Amino acid sequence: MMDTGAGLMLLYEDESVDVRYGTGARLQLSPCGSEFLLEAPTGPPGHPRERVRQRTRFTVSAYKDQVLSALAFRNRHAARPYLPEELVPPHQNQPSLCLDPEVVWPGGWSCDAQTGPGGETTVKAEGGRAELTLSPSGEEFSVRFTCGLSRQQVGVSIRPPGGDWSISSDFSLSPQPEGGPRRCTTVTQVHSCCAVSPPWSYPLSLALRLRGAPPSEPGAVPTEGSPGTSTPSPERWSRLPEPLPLTCPSPHRHRWRGEDLPPREEQSPPDVPSELVRVMWCHGATYRALGGACRPVGGAVPVVEVSPGDGSLIRSDGVDSYFIHHKAGGKGSAQVKEEVTYHLKNLPPDRPGQLFSVSTAVSRASRLLSCYLGAQRSLNLSANPSCLQEVGSSCESPPPEASGSPEQRSRVQQTNHRSGVVAAELEKIRRFTFLLENNHLLRGGEPAGAGIGPAGGPEVPEEDFIADVLQRTSRTIQDIDALLSAASLT
């Protein structure tokens, strides 16, 4: 990650990015990555902050380094990367005759995993278009894969003499030379082994099993019947993440945080976000918030992971005050996994020459977990749909509002409005359900003195409270049924 003076980088649950700089400046990326807002450092009292809002691909040289750094952070952790050709370095922009997003991973009998000098394990897909590297701790992994560049959403195509021209949905023309290939680049991402998306589940399981295989038996992890099988089994196929379109189909959904809020006070550090944050980068360490994937027993309890950059990983133990540091000792096949447990009230002191401060990392992770819990149980969370929710349907065809008769356009707009209302009501149900399932856990995370009943014992949820919540949920479901019935009649 390039050094642009950033002290804090946040990827929110909607995949928007917020970057804070030591100078007081701030840069925000929209969830789709196609637009940014840059706020200058705070000026004299009474003077508004200067703001610059531009399309990401057309950023001027004065802001290019900051935009590139924010976009690289987003693409490293988001589900789908945004890759405009204008911002991809020429040496990373390569022609490709094959941009098929599907790849085949080797079977266990034919896989020869590579072991790096630090104890990492690498598995490569057939053809070399993707690879997965398991960290020495065995708790996180990185992936590298070939991905096409972001393109315009094609609507109508015409063929003038001398080459092809595609008319995009925003009616701009982009030349495509006769016989020229589509462009591609290599994307690197980092993920937790506790929250694995479908494209990486099989290669990760293969790397985990091969990591523990004896050195004399690199292929002793059979996943298919015999080496002579000609057709790969279904689990060996993966569909790689595809790039987001070059232009956003819903720019009206871009919202910017803190535009109307006063600047944060100096004594309050800007490392305690109040919204649902998926990934946070702060002073060289990466923090990930996971919604309970690591706790199969006991319900969906959020946890926070810290990746300090040395191959180890620190993970919180549910909502308790304990953190487990996963390390790997030794090299190659001789590596031995080590686990050290920390408690918030008894963190190890800093020592000269250490790569990072365990005390600082764990304390910051604890604050992030507390804020994540607070944001999850808040009933005031915004249920506004993200622009990314419309990208899937818009990639295949122009927006439906752009065609048809006025009556058809009005009907489409009404349907979209109903869909937004239904999504908001479903979000309310999800929050009510979370409160019911995790009431005892959330009370345990409250400050001292909270959750104490009148008699001094632990507060027990009253039956009336539960009944009231269930009645609200029932009314919400009835409202949704009414909305759907009305939609079917119009």
Image (cartoon, rainbow, N blue to C red):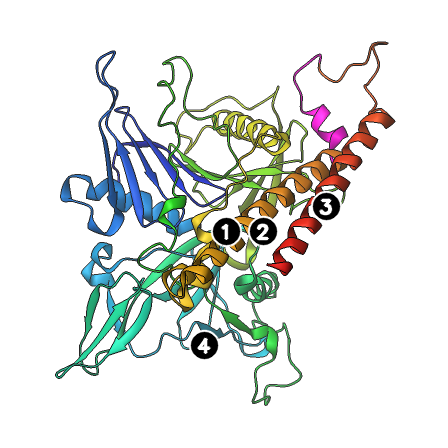
- Count of numbered circles in the view: 4
Q: CA distance from mark 3 to mark 1?
A: 36 Å
The residue type indicated by label 1 comes to: His
Q: Earlier in the sequence, mark 4 or mark 2?
A: 4
Q: CA distance from mark 3 to mark 4?
A: 48 Å
Asked if the magenta segment contains residue 279, the reply would be no
Q: Residue at x 43, y 42 (%)?
A: 309
The label on residue 477 is: 3
Which percent across, then down, holds residue 368? Answer: 53, 30
Q: Residue at x 84, y 14 (%)?
A: 457
Which percent across, then down, holds residue 462? Answer: 85, 24
Would residue 404 appear left or right of 157 to someone viewing this image?
A: right
Determine whether the residue tagged by mark 4 lies in a helix, strand or loop: loop
The segment highlighted magenta reads 438-449
User: Circle 1 is placed at which residue position?
Assistant: 191
CB-based contact (under 8 Å), mark 4 and mark 2:
no
Q: Give the quadrant of the C terminus.
A: bottom right
The residue type indicated by label 3 comes to: Ile
CB-based contact (under 8 Å), mark 1 and mark 4:
no
The residue type indicated by label 4 comes to: Glu
Q: CA distance from mark 1 to mark 4?
A: 22 Å
Which percent across, then down, holds residue 348? Answer: 55, 24
User: Circle 4 is placed at which residue position?
Assistant: 126
User: Circle 2 is placed at which residue position?
Assistant: 195
Indicate which label's residue lies in the foreground, 3 or 1: 3
Q: CA distance from mark 2 to mark 1?
A: 7 Å
Q: Earlier in the sequence, mark 3 or mark 2?
A: 2
Determine whether the residue tagged by mark 1 lies in a helix, strand or loop: strand
Answer few, some or many: residues within 10 Å of disc 1's Cα (few below 14, many 20 plus, some between 14 and 19): some
The residue type indicated by label 2 comes to: Ala
